[in-house]
Image: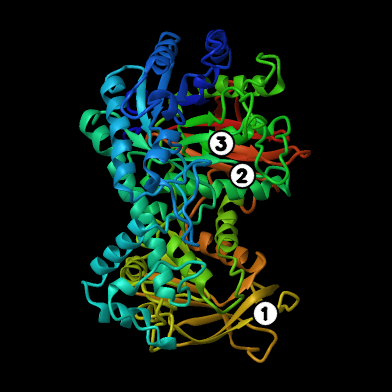
Amino acid sequence: MKKKHPCSSFPHFIHGADYNPEQWIYDKAVWDMDMQLMEKAHTNEMTVGIFSWAKLEPSEGVYDFSFLDEIIDKIGKNGKKVILSTPSGARPHWLAEKYPEVLRVGQDGVREHFRARENHCFTSPVYREKVKNINRKLAERYGNNPTVIAWHISNEFNGECHCQLCCDAFRDFLKNKFNNNIDELNHNYWADFWSHTYANFEQIEPPGKNTETGIHGLNLDWKRFVTHQTKEFIKCELEPIREITPHLPVTTNMMFEFYDIDYYKFVDIIDFASWDSYPEWHSCDDSVIASKTAFWHDLYRSLMKKPFLLMESTPSLVNWKPYNKMKRPGLDVLSSLQAIAHGSDSVQYFQWRKSRGSSEKFHGAVVGHDGTDNTRVFRSVKKTGEILEAIDEIAGSFVDSQVAVIFDWENMWALDDCQGYAKDDKKYFETCYDYHRLFWERGINCDIVSPKSDLKGYKIVVAPMLYLTDAETIENLKNYVSDGGILYGTYMMGTVDANDLCYLGGIPAKDLRKVFGIVSEEIDTLYPHERCHTVFGEAEHELIDYCEVIHPETAEVVASYCDGFYKYSPAVTINSFNKGKAVYQAARDRQSLKSAIIDMLIQESGVTSVVDALGVLPHGVTAHSRTDGENLYIFVENYSCDESATVKLRKKMKNMLTGEFCEICEIAPYGFAIFKEEH
């Protein structure tokens, strides 16, 4: 197994930060101080240029790269590397004044004023041209600079535009999808409902505050279009970069629980994944926060099946949440190492030095307003850097997962738009988190995948609330089970097709009915105070939110409802299908039922923990592994704030930070250990 570093020219763990030296251009002594502090903090990289457009092109066609020349030179002479950003996330004032079409139009049809950031029109030919121009200049000037190791494209793409350009592009998108046939669109949108049939494509408007929102197929296609148009903009950004610097990898920073863009669609235009992680630590049990954060680490690692970069994290706190809480001592380092455990090849911070003014002046940073290294935060960053240097051999290694949980943006959009079930809160994120957490608690590596991903090699695949299942998804799941996999599905499985039309003839739809060996008749949505129960594995389990009434066809009933008019009808079934097996859970539970089912499937499939855990690890403790094909690296983490934990390894292993060999390890509160198992 060959190592795969995100930045092949720098095969090490990256430890760095978002650096905005242009904010200190009038006091360059700060730059020299920064170089000294970067060395003390054991950093080896800085990401620069992300919001520098106004400095780089102060007026149209007039370029000034002097500050960037100087700062890249300083960083390089200091023995460190640069990830160079393109500045399209925040346009200069002159661009908006001269070309107002680059400003985004809201759902109300009103064009925005110049303000904020990441709010440009992705369709605007003018904006695309200006972005390509500045990117070309950057690529020509720095593309062969040995200090530059990768490109960071724009920043946190988000939002949508309803200008005429975008409306026309949306219509073209629909024409392409429906073969320029308005009758085909009307049929797939079920547009005869409420007499909303379209006579031609020109009548179609994007859904919004004052336009059509009752056609679910239209709403779904608009969200697909937003992803499509964002992707097209990125491809446009990349044209000069790919042409001039084909040797430099590119990425764009993605986000936590981001709703608007289907990131699965980005895999063919970037070279590695990266994301910005800002958990709400200490807002509840930190193990819950840790498992949710782990879900997104696992998703971005799974996105391209190779190491990703943690592009942004705070070394202390943020300034934009309702309550901006400091990380407690120990958790600051542990949360950084969590990313490494899940497959990141970097720990990077926003920001290196605190801004003096404006909206992010109180956002956490490695260097505070005091400008010194004499702070708890700086010492924590330094410690993280020292640890990354000590375990640098792990960089580029893989996470080998035996299980996967399916998460799908399109399914989430369709579910949320659905006027049924619990209308305003289907709890899709929460349900996916719950299933992933079961593996996290057991120290089992888990991938987060698309329903269209290659599922071969996984012993267990969980598909929670997979309401939208198109033909490709159905075929993929059927083949996975047929070839010997274990598929664990839930209520709402296979209800609508790719256009959000209900399947006829019974659900789960099409071949999924054969795979699961059941047919669903109806589903009961429980009020928040209602509870039902089932017995599975000699224990009673409480059911909440949904109880689906299903009938077995070829499936074996392994648990039945204990209450309601559907008492005695199946709550959990298992069906053999060719070489594999499909489990169906017809009701939502708090966690105990799915936990018992997962334990049964783990035992049956031979899935193993990365440590010697015969069940759930101590509360708040988890373990993960990476491998280079020859060695196994095991990370044990404790997210308890006040309880030490004892963990037994599979055999005696070397602690990479202490050099000691042990089989039983004691992990302090907010502590961790990293072990090497040589094959």
Out of 312 and 493, give the one closest to the viewer. Answer: 312
Mark 2 surroundings: few (<14), some (14-19) or many (≥20) residues within 10 A = many
Q: To which residue does mark 3 refer?
A: 635
Residue 108 versus residue 142 in the image, above or below: below
Q: Nearer the viewer, mark 1 or mark 2?
A: 1
Mark 1 surroundings: few (<14), some (14-19) or many (≥20) residues within 10 A = some
Q: Give the spatial CA distance, label 1 vs label 2.
A: 33 Å
Q: To which residue does mark 2 refer?
A: 622
Disc 2 residue type (three-letter): Thr
Disc 3 residue type (three-letter): Phe
Q: Which numbered disc, 3 or 1, marks the residue that appears first in the sequence?
A: 1
Q: To which residue does mark 1 refer?
A: 526
Q: Is residue 78 left or right of residue 511?
A: right
Q: Is residue 457 left or right of residue 526?
A: left
Q: Which numbered disc, 2 or 3, marks the residue that appears first in the sequence?
A: 2
Residue 8 x/y as whole percent: 32, 27
